[in-house]
Image (tube, helix red, strand yellow):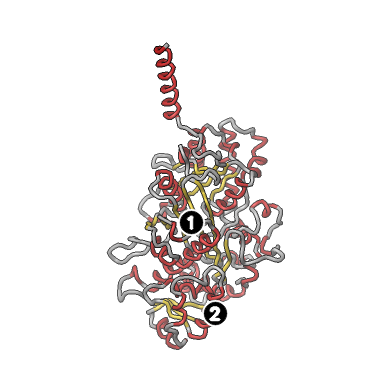
Amino acid sequence: MSFPVVKGAAYALIQATDMLMHQGTTQTSERRKNPESEHLQKLPEHLRSFEEAVNYPPNQIYIGNMTPNDLKGIARPWYQAPVSGASRTGKYGEIMPEDEFLGLMKIVDAFDLVVLEEQFQANVREKMIRHPVLGDIKDLDKLSKNPSKVEEIGKLVEGHLAQPMYFAGKLVGCVKKAHEFDESLSDHVMFENLVAKASAVFALKLLLSKAEFHAEQVEYIIECSEEACGDMNQRGGGNFAKSIGEMCGCVNATGSDTRSFCAGPAHALVEAAALAQSGIYKNIVVLAGGASAKLGMNSKDHVKKGMPALEDMLGAFAIQIAENDGVNPVIRTDGVGRHKIGSGASPQAVMTAIVADPLDKLGYKIPEIDRYCAEMQNPEITEPAGAGDVPLANYKMIGALAVKRGELEKADLLEAVHRFGMPGFAPTQGHIPSGVPFIGHARDMILEGKINRAMIIGKGSLFLGRLTNLFDGVSFIIEKNSGMPKDTCFDKEEIRSMIGQAMRDVAQLLRSE
């Protein structure tokens, strides 16, 4: 069986403090309920500068300038331990300031919905022209066209015809609604969808700039964010994937959108692996942009505790999956974990389904996986809100399952958790933390011989859609390539077939003698 490989990964962060203030659902809900609330008045004092966001250790890990192990050696609070000499660019990607991102939103807008104030637009245009990755992007000339006066933008916003765009506390643009009365094309929805599209475009451009393949070689794109684009007749009809590929010059690609709340990226990567292994497509990109609605979700608790509002980052990623090249780490498609409809929702049932069951299929024990990556939310964000350290809770459940199965001594549990786990470092963007932030690191660690295999775990809360109370979970293993044109990993049926053929060959030889 020739397994597909992880051939490249790119990650993008966009600091969006003004979006946090004006589009994050915690703030929009508070403004609707109590516009003079103490939280809304205090929040501006807790917003970070761009430099502070760049210097934040978890953000440096996300773009590849540091490793997850580095975070273990930094005392918390991490926001009081800035990284000396930190850069906005990293091995895997980049951290972008909000003004440049607003310019990118106008560039990717295909229906002239984004309007920018003339001086702001001119300033952003100069920055985008000089950008090493985006300087050649399709439709950059949109930043030379149709600027507006701030008074005209204000009228659109005040008339509830457009969603405001702010930078440094000043109104600098807006996103107009795309239909007179279609709620699926409202200014609010179009703003969120353009944020998702623009951030995913940035991630794909980063991947193409770092990878050993060209945009024309991409054959299929799977987009797996938590947004939905469509109109009132098909609210989630799609297609984010092709709209993103169009902006990046992927003229030979088609694509589709995959959704499963936080587990969406894991599903998408399994789908991509199957497509590559079957030979239907040779180069597939799995990607997702960020969610403006999730900015500042826990900001009330951060403000109450005197912390910075740490949820000011939009996250995005793009991962290349390709047919086996004999070099890059493989995805073991013969050992995919899945939380089935009948699996049950208890922590033990979930971990059995998505961790133990696939390992049993491959003949591995839980401690034989070098790294587990599940729900990599930054604990510095979640703990103040009472949600605890989510990654650590997952590692402890995995370790406890290993003890129950007799694969680990109880006395060794915490040491094992420390060995195969890692601190959470991803922004709380729902689908973004769910396994994918470690793929770039895992690929490098395997190629460098530091580890042999890692398990990527996606978990989702399907009950949020109010259609079912079910939970979701998908996992897969990334493993060192055997270096052979075809992997020497066979399932039981292949082994049985080979033995049968060998016995027939021996019988034929004996008869001939």
Residue 314, image x and y in percent?
Answer: 52, 65
Give me the residue at 51% from left, 83% from top. Answer: 122
Mark 1 crowdedness (10 Å alpha carbons): few <14, some 14-19, many ≥20: many
The earlier-in-sequence mark between 2 and 1 is 2
Residue type (three-letter) at the residue carrying disc 1:
His
Q: Is residue 484 visible?
A: yes
Left or right side of 406 for 232: left
Nearer to us: label 2 or label 1: 2
User: Image quadrant for the N terminus?
Assistant: top left
Secondary element at image label 2: helix
Q: Which residue position holds label 1?
A: 431
- Within 10 Å of the Cα at label 2, are there few (<14), some (14-19), or many (20+) other Cα atoms? few
* Tag 2: amino acid: Glu
Q: Residue furthest left?
A: 233
| Quarter where residue 54 is shown | bottom right
- Rendered location of residue 166, percent (x, y): 51, 78
Give the mark count.
2
Distance from the alpha carbon under mark 2 to that under mark 1? 33 Å
Image quarter of the C terminus: top left
Q: Which mark is residue 488?
A: none
Is residue 415 positioned above or below 299 on the image? above
Q: SS class of the residue under badge 1?
A: loop
